Amino acid sequence: MVDVKSTLRVINDGMLDAQPPVTQGQTLKWLVGHEEDTDRVRIGLATYAPGRVEQLHWHPIEALYFVISGHATVRDFEGNAYEAGPGTTIYAPAGIAGAHGWTVKEGLQLLAVRATTEDVRKLQFKVDEQTKRSYVDLEYLAQRGALHFKSHY
C-alpha cells in the first residue's frame, strides 16, 4: 500500500493577511502562489474601493481577472472601454498589447490569476494613455525586490 498524504488546502480569506497594495484603495490577499505552496500559478483576491482608478498597465505574464462583485469600466491599450460586473472575465495576454486598466464604479472584488509565481515575471509596467510610453518606477522595482535579477545565460 502506498502512503499518500493529502496536499489539499481549504483557504478562508479571513485567515489571510493583506499584501502591500499596488494602488491606493486596493486590498490584495494572495490565496495561492504567494508562499512556496506552488510554482505554477498565483491566485489572489483583490478588492477596490469605489472611485479607484487602476492605471493602464501590462504584465510580462498572462493575467486573468474574474469579477466577483461590483462594477468597473475596463480600458484597453487602444482606449476602448468595456463594462464589467459580476461574472465578467477579463483576460490580459502578456505584453503591452494586453495592457488594461479600470475605473471602479462600485466597490469591486476580483479573483486575480497569474500564470506564474516567478519573481522576475510578476512586474507591472505602467502605460501613459496619451503617449503610449511604457515605464516602471524605481520605487516600485525596489518594493518588488526587482533591482537585480539572476542571469538566464
Image (cartoon, grey):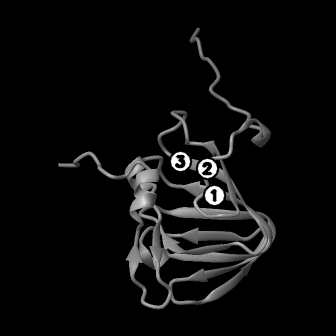
In the figure, 113 relative to 90: above or below?
above
In the drawing, does residue 111 fall left or right of residue 58? Answer: right
Q: Are marks 1 and 2 in contact (CB under 8 Å)?
A: yes
Q: Earlier in the sequence, mark 1 or mark 3?
A: 3
- Quadrant of the rendered image containing residue 64: bottom right
In the drawing, does residue 30 fall left or right of residue 88? Answer: left
Instruction: Report if residue 78 is visible in the image.
Output: yes
Amino acid of disc 3: Val
| Mark 1 vs mark 3, CA separation in Å | 10 Å
Residue sitting at the far left: 153
Q: Are marks 2 and 3 in contact (CB under 8 Å)?
A: yes
| Mark 1 vs mark 2, CA separation in Å | 6 Å
Residue at numbered disc 2: 43
Residue 33's disc number? none
Amino acid of disc 2: Ile
Amino acid of disc 1: Ala
Q: Position of residue 46 (x, y in %)?
A: 69, 57
- Dot 2, how many residues are within 10 Å of its Cα: few (below 14), some (14-19), or many (20+)? many
| Mark 2 vs mark 3, CA separation in Å | 7 Å
Camera-side mark, 1 or 3:
1
Residue at numbered disc 1: 112
Q: Position of residue 105 (x, y in %)?
A: 79, 77
- Dot 1, how many residues are within 10 Å of its Cα: few (below 14), some (14-19), or many (20+)? many
Residue at numbered disc 3: 41
Q: Earlier in the sequence, mark 1 or mark 2?
A: 2
